[in-house]
Image (tube, rainbow, N blue to C red):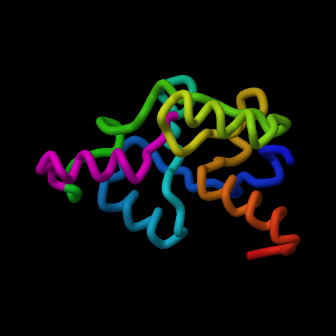
Amino acid sequence: MRVSDAMTKPVLIVGPDHTLRQVAELMAARRVGSAIVIDPESSGVGIMTERDLLNAIAAGLDPDSERVNAHITREVVYAVPDWTLEQAAATMARGGFRHLVVMDGTEVRGVISVRDIMRVWVQNRAGVATL
């Protein structure tokens, strides 16, 4: 099984000037644990995860005024669509994170999370088409 078979798409994309609350609301509405942050003034993409939001709120920051740009992970580890799920899981375990941005060249194709991998593995073991 490949990353392209399990990844979440389309991805939630936000800008660097969104507030933490705006991103949290969008993530909750879409039922996803991350948002891709694209800043037109810089190269590459960043990622905002549930953990990033949690850390900012725990630090006492105001979610209505604090901007995403100050809290994203900029050194994103990428996966490619044709990686195996084992490669993605090993990369997550090695790096200590739960999300990988799936890139095809410079284009964001999706996000794969621990939850996505677990869902596919459970479906395959149970012989179930969807959960």
Please name whichever residue, 96 or 52, is drawn nearer the observer in this view of the structure: 96
Residue 7 shown in magenta: no
Image location of residue 100, percent across then percent down: 60, 39
Image location of residue 32, percent across then percent down: 53, 62
Taking the spot 32% from the left edge, 38% from the top edge, the residue there is: 71
- Please tell me how many numbered marks the rendered image carries: 0
Please name whichever residue, 42 or 35, is drawn nearer the observer in this view of the structure: 35
Image location of residue 22, percent across then percent down: 36, 61
Q: In this view, does 92 lie above or below 31?
A: above
- For the C terminus, give its image quadrant: bottom right
Taking the spot 76% from the left edge, 58% from the top edge, the residue there is: 121
The outermost residue toward the front is: 125
Image location of residue 55, percent across then percent down: 26, 46
Left or right, 59 with respect to 126, comes to: left
Left or right, 9 with respect to 32, comes to: right
Picture quadrant of residue 129 = bottom right
Q: Is residue 128 above or below residue 13?
A: below
Taking the spot 71% from the left edge, 56% from the top edge, the residue there is: 9
State which region is magenta: 46-62
Taking the spot 75% from the left edge, 38% from the top edge, the residue there is: 86
The outermost residue toward the left is: 60
Left or right, 104 with respect to 36, comes to: right
